[in-house]
Amino acid sequence: SWHLAHYLKAQCKKVLPHLQTAIYMLNARKVARFKKGYDTLPKNDKVDAWVIADHLRFGRLPHEMQETLIYDALRRLTRTRFHLVHEIARNKTYMLNQLYLKFSGLRQDNPFSDTFGATSIAVIEELDPGIIAEMPLEELVEFLQEKGKNRFAEPEEMAKYLKQLARNSYRLDKIMADPVNLSLSVILSTIQHMETQVKRLDKEIERMMKGIPQTLTSVKGIGPVYAAGLIAEIGDIHRFDDHHALAKYAGFVWTQYQSGEYEAEDTSRMRTGNKYLRYYLVQASDAIRKHDTEYKAFYQKKYQEVTKHQHKRALVLTARKLVRLVHSLLRTKQLYTPKEERRE
């Protein structure tokens, strides 16, 4: 549909310059759902055209297609980054399952702050529970200090704890050891390669963002990459009448269940909307709450309201709050001023 729509738009300018023509791109899923209202319709081109015409008869046209090549180009990069980030997460989960076979104690109670940090990876690749358990304490301390670049405050305590985890871990049979080690090595190299490609994408995204005027990056926590993800998916902000329309487009709307005098208080979020825009809004809100006092207080308030899924719920609601700010900044093109500075 992308090629056809842009071809028709270009041809209308060339062949029919004296007429006011407009190109509209319909949501195929909405048309398909509309067709379900007719129980006995077959599937052929003539019927499909009739269903589209009947759908248009209701007058619910989307916004007219605009010149969006800059947004489309940026969207290729941000969506590819989205894909790679999720693949990295999947590979890390799979690698942790493999790690449990080799070093169950390290998987269950990792003493390192980051399982995929340099020191942790060195332990996983170069050592195993049997070697660690038999290794002299001084030699293990030296190994940790070398791989950690002398950043451990108490390397001896870390070494003792690692030896304890090694003694409590399951032992892997020799027949399984080589396949598991090879599997871990392949997955780790794949993760590292993907992370390198994400950095390549980030550099190109930052380069493209220099040519796009915007004020989203005036919010501490929103860098060029997150700003690019938001702008690429939103496109022309004037497509949305208000922040409610933008929130609905992102999928930040909650269902209502009401009948008579009863209305449910606990409702779920609708599983619709632009998943890419939703992802970048959530990621941006997670970064902003660490720097902005207003968003930090809002996050903590929502976090304390429930006892289950606290972080996810608070983060999604913070992202919904961020929608209003994003809509305002893109419309007004003004710089963001934190709440404490506005008071002053």
Image: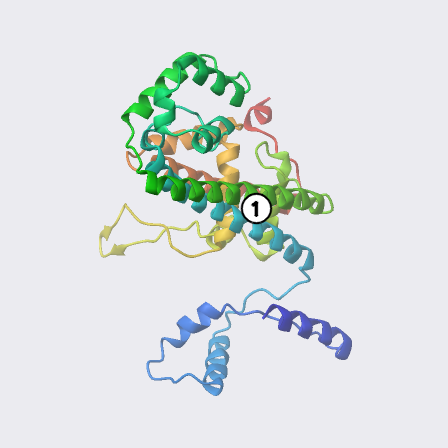
Which residue appears farthest toward the front when viewing the image?
Answer: 174
Residue at numbered disc 1: 327
Asked whether, in this view, residue 235 is left or right of residue 300, the answer is: right
Q: Secondary structure at mark 1?
A: helix
Residue 191, placed above or below residue 79: above
Q: Position of residue 277 (x, y in %)?
A: 52, 50
Residue 97 shown left or right of residue 273 in the figure: left
Query: In the figure, is residue 328 to the left or right of 157?
Result: right
Mark 1: amino acid: His
Depth check, front residue: 22 or 191: 191
Residue 319: x %, y % from top left: 47, 41
Instruction: Look at 69% across and 62% down and name the residue there.
Output: 67
Viewer-proximal residue, 62 or 157?
157
Q: Position of residue 62 (x, y in %)?
A: 55, 66
* Residue 37 x/y as whole percent: 36, 76
Which residue is located at x 74 percent, y 46 percent?
Answer: 211
Query: Quick check: 286 above or below 63?
Result: above
